[in-house]
Image: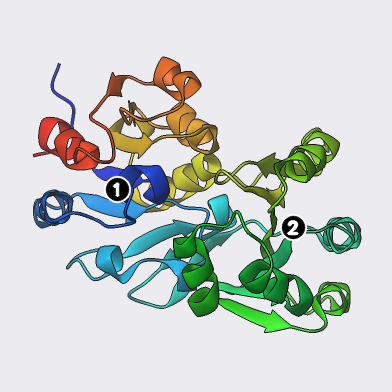
Amino acid sequence: MEREIKLVALDLDGTTFNSEKVITERTRKAIAAALKKGVIVMPATGRQKTGLPESFTSIPGVRYALTSNGGAVVDLWEDSMIYADFIPYKTACRVIDQLIQIDALIEFYHDGKSYADRKSYNRALHVYKNFPDWFKEYIKVSRIPVDDLRERVYSGKFNIEKMLASFDDMILRQQLFDEMHNDPELSVVFGNSFNVEITAATANKGHSLLKLAEKLGIMPEQIMVCGDTMNDRTMFEAAGLAVAMGNADEEIKAMADDVTLSNDEDGVAAAIEKWVL
């Protein structure tokens, strides 16, 4: 049965990016061809707005982005926020009190920017041994280190899209996840292999994707998504066509309507070529 796809939402790390954190020429061409056809193609990521890769957003026609794991959906052309689901104030205060005591890089996202606790920021760059080089470089260019992260949360002046902790010690990471993931006021996920990402209970990729689709007059069955981890689960549940990467977690593959090639084999390009072009 032929599908009419009007919106394509793409996870970034492990999906659109290959293992070298590059969007290949074939993938860029496939995205550009879909956009030229009138299909909306957008990143759907845990990254904040300022962390979006220019290699994706510079493709002519890319207008929308789902950021902060669904904490915000932005219009890049208008430099405006279309939809937001912030962490409630009292919840954010409770979370920051817990995070600030642990040995991890602690940060929150507000208005598309990432603010990091300066002490943990310095530890992450100069002490932590298990952070990959690409992540340390990404931290340098995308984080704003501050001395008063907790005070900023308590001030109530910051609408917090996401809070997160990135760990050098994976035992501590698992402990935090176990402590928080059943909290009814929060959505808690592993965003990558070394962090824990925290948003409002209703903030997730799938929910925010459907909010954008509704605004644009697009039906769920007209949405295709590509992803690789359980962080993409809600998108898979929301979209009419869920495509898992060849390198995806087995749980994600089991949820998928189709499995494409891996992120090192232009899997996103292959999926767009198969289902959209």
Please tell me the numbered disc located at residue 87. 2
Callout 2 environment at 10 Å: few (<14), some (14 to 19), or many (20+)? Answer: many
27 left or right, relative to 43: left
Please tell me the numbered disc located at residue 187. none
Residue 146 location (% of width, % of height): 73, 83
Residue 226 location (% of width, % of height): 34, 37
Q: How far apart are marks 2 and 1 (CA)?
A: 32 Å
In front: label 2 or label 1: 1
218 left or right, relative to 210: left
Q: Name the residue under label 1.
A: 18
Residue placed farthest to the bottom in the image? Answer: 147
- Disc 2 secondary structure class: loop
56 left or right, relative to 82: left
Image point 26% across, 52% down: which residue? 41
Q: Would residue 5 be visible to someone looking at this image?
A: no
Above or below, comparing residue 207 to residue 182 in the picture: below
Q: Would residue 169 be visible to someone looking at this image?
A: yes
Above or below, comparing residue 233 to residue 104 in the picture: above
Image point 23% across, 30% down: which residue? 261
- Disc 1 secondary structure class: loop
